[in-house]
Amino acid sequence: MSILSKSAIAKGDGSFVIEEVSVSDPKEDEVLVQIKAAGLCHTDYDSLSWGRPIIMGHEGAGIVSKVGSKVKKFAKGDAVILNWATPCMVCFQCQEGNQHICESNSPVVAGENRLPSGHAHFEGTKWNDQPIERSFNLGTISEYALVKSSALVKINDERPNFSAASIVGCGVMTGYGSVVNAAKVEAGSSVVVLGCGGVGLNVIQAARISGAARIIAIDINPNKLKLAKQFGATEGILADKADKGLLNAAEEVKQRCGGRGADYAFECTAIPALGAAPLAMVRNAGTAVQVSGIEEDLTIDMRLFEWDKIYINPLYGKCRPQIDFPKLMSLYKKGELLLDEMITQEYRLEELQTGFEDMLQGKNAKGVVVFG
């Protein structure tokens, strides 16, 4: 029996509406989740212009409402985090341990002909009597989401904070995993973080948790540098917008790091022109990490790679959801991973436009839409 779910629907032309969709009972391998909170991300804003209707949102947490006949790991009432990079566990990449780039299910690893949003089509959700896609197969900015059971991770907490849990499944995981899973930052090392938005702050606190001795935050916004210190930055550099490639900032980093540069540098600005900037920040044989997922042609001075520098471009912090999400929630419960402090503002669904405006103006470290 279908239920009605008030949802944020991107129309594909740059606008969105808040309207009801009908959601069917789950199929044998599906779960119906009552969404309690959904994180807001720049990708959600981008989805407004993907050229077709889509239920927005790919970060979220909630409560299991119904399960399909073959679902054994979840039951009604379970608190869960939703994960957008769903592993199949049987393809080549999953068998290699690369669950985040599953060849069967990953919405961003689908070859040259993938759709801009990379989303599958589902019959279980309808808008105006027509099937509608759910962003990253989730569509979390909605009262209910019908998802594959493999897209869920249980929250082992009797009184979960759904707002905090909702942001784990993208920005937190991307930042933390880029440090811990991808770069494998070592205790006592020096780290530079370019850009102190939501992802950058999670890189900073992951570096702190990893025991980095020096964490240098770089941003053009002095308020973000203050926030960076709250999350673990030991110092900051106020950058100049006119500093091409942040080469002047790189010189200051080198001076602060014994004249040779940092051990690790992470680019979290999402500015394509700064894709190579972390290479200028690291010492010879250091590691530069491009976190923000730039996907366009760049011209790079190959001398930036001299000598023996490593440049990596991990997706989603090399996430293994069933392993990483419980670790993150455990760190949060112990007070080591700051999630409540990450959430600047909560919004009702009807306030989504305000949430987007605050995000685009840089007012929020993270905004969250709450339901009920």
Image (spheres, grey):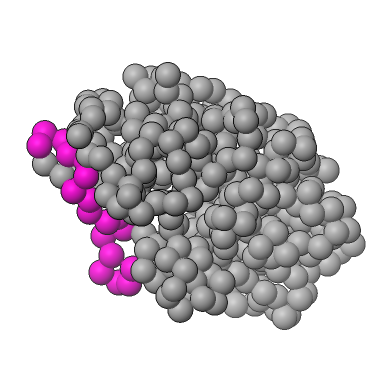
Magenta-drawn stretch contains 114: yes
Give the extent of the magenta segment: 110-129
Position of the N terminus, as image quadrant, is top left
Q: Is residue 24 above or below residue 351?
A: below
Q: Is residue 260 visible?
A: yes
Q: Is residue 121 magenta?
A: yes
Q: Position of residue 7 (x, y in %)?
A: 29, 30
Q: Quadrant of the C terminus?
A: top left
Most common SS among magenta residues:
loop
Residue located 54% across and 23% down the image:
345
Q: From this viewpoint, is residue 203 visible? A: no
Q: Residue at x 75, y 70 (%)?
A: 286
Question: What residue is at 49 percent from the left and 71 percent from the top?
Answer: 94
Q: Is residue 290 above or below residue 158?
A: below
The residue sitting at the left extreme is 129
User: Measuring 57% from the left and 55% from the top, which residue is drawn there?
Assistant: 322
